[in-house]
Image (tube, rainbow, N blue to C red):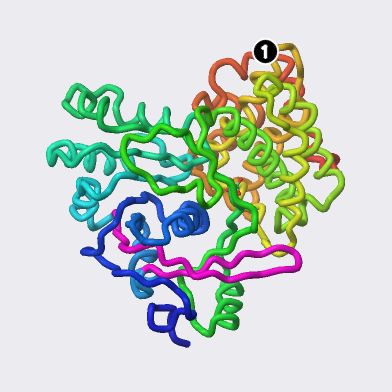
Amino acid sequence: MTRLTPATAPPGTRVRAFGPSAPVGIVHLGIGAFHRAHQAVYTQEADPDGAWGICGVTQRSATVAGHLRPQDGLYTVLQRDADHTRADVVSQVHDVIDGSTETGRLTERLADPRVQVVTLTVTEKGYRPGGAVGRLIDGLQARRRADAGPVTVLSCDNLSGNGEVLSRLVLDHRDDDLAAWAATNVRFPSSMVDRIVPATTPADRDEVARRLGVDDAGLVVAEPFRQWVIEDRFAAARPAWEKAGAELVTDVAPYERRKLRVLNGTHSLLAYLGALAGYPTIAEAVADDSLAGAAWQLIEHDVAPTLAADGLDVTGYGRTVLERFANPALRHRTVQVAMDGTQKLGPRLLGTIRDARAVGHLPRAATLAVAAWMVYVERATTENDLPLDDPQADVLREAVGSSSDLVAALLSLEAVFGADLPEDREFRALLGDLVAQVRAGSIR
Ligand code: CS2
């Protein structure tokens, strides 16, 4: 079957120049499925003139060489819910760079005065020195030397205060000229992003082939819902993303907290309990009344009180979230959401636990989520029926293997639980009870 290209794209597809000499206004670090189904879609809708073409950067050479480049950056977003599917071709990506080999070209793009926004989706584990952050620093240095003007660096990852976190990683402990230049030329606003985008499967690709008559290796699948709340603090121009429904606000923190604690927190709870119970997908996990009940308790009893001061509706939002999880057409795998637990527990669950403990509450469902993660890690390291996909997998394996006390072994990982949580005796006792119950399968 022929590939999706400008020549074979459906009529009406807006096609622009593609490749190293195509002008772009945005450099995006981490052009995986999420970016393609989220920021790229907002940008395309906000930018009818194609002034804000995206240069997508990835460390995966297969994405560049095999998926996007042969298609001149075109790809389809397959939007699915229970009774409706639609396929839209996106043509906002005007260049792709293999960040692992084309570092010179990446630096050049970042130092191009036409580029005024750099966006990032590098996942939780991308926020450490080196990697994408290292390349961003090199690019900003080159930009300073080239006097290429101000630029906004916009994090779109699921971390609280993602702009803050990134700005500290880029600028802290620097004694060179970068920090001084950045103080007047770079802004790091925070943003909250939301759209469920499961990994694409061969069956999805077959479906697009049937619908559009072409093979699309860059295809992504998404739910209809999407949300983007952005701190309105830009160093230079930006696309009019509000035209595509983005919300520009002065303070994103309340939205980030609610999304992380409600959506991502219950997602992780359902992923661990669901995978342990043998449910392949989130939709199947949330269809189990006892698991849905635990998710609801997490929202209503544990999270809502910690967010009361923010003044946003938590339970109404939570109901919508659980309805979205029930979307049977998405087939979002529990083991996919279960990955990278050491990076996800903190922003999703431990803030809720700490805030609840500070006022003397014992948050049962949030603690259950941590217990489920522990049993998941135990099972993934001792039996081979669940994947342990985590940047700290070796540390986890060693911790589980070194002690017969699972709770003590994992709680002692200070990078995950800090020094405070292992000291909290009531929390620790509850965690021990819940681990025993999850192991025995009695949560259901
Ligand atoms: C999920 C998120 O994989 C995960 O850990 O919780 O990717 C989730 O689907 C998105 O944050 C939804 O916006």
Indicate the quadrant where residue 263 lies: top right
Pick the front one: 27 or 334: 27
Q: Is residue 401 above or below residue 32?
A: above
Indicate the quadrant where residue 328 lies: bottom right
Residue 392: image location, x then y, percent = 48, 39
Residue 323: image location, x then y, percent = 76, 50
> What residue do we see at 61% from left, 36% from top?
260
Q: Tell me: 42 left or right of 97.
A: right
Pick the front one: 18 or 429: 18
Q: Tell me: 97 left or right of 309.
A: left
The reply to whether the residue tagged 1 has its Cβ within 8 angstroms of ligand 1 is no
Local SS, label 1:
helix
Pick the front one: 224 or 15: 15
Q: Which residue has dot 1 on it?
A: 358
The stretch drawn in magenta includes residue 143: no
> What residue do we see at 71% from left, 53% from top?
282
On the question of residue 435 being in view, the answer is no
The stretch drawn in magenta includes residue 97: yes
Residue 410: image location, x then y, percent = 60, 30
| Outermost residue, top side | 359
Q: Is residue 264 above or below residue 89?
A: above
Indicate the quadrant where residue 374 lies: top right
Mark 1 nearby-residue class (10 Å; few <14, some 14–19, many ≥20): few
On the question of residue 170 being in view, the answer is yes
Amino acid type at image mark 1: Ala
> What residue do we see at 37% from left, 61% from top?
49
Residue 358: image location, x then y, percent = 67, 12
Q: Pick the quarter of the image with the C terminus.
A: top right
Pick the front one: 371 or 192: 192
Start-end of magenta stretch: 73-99
Q: Is residue 248 above or below residue 180?
A: below
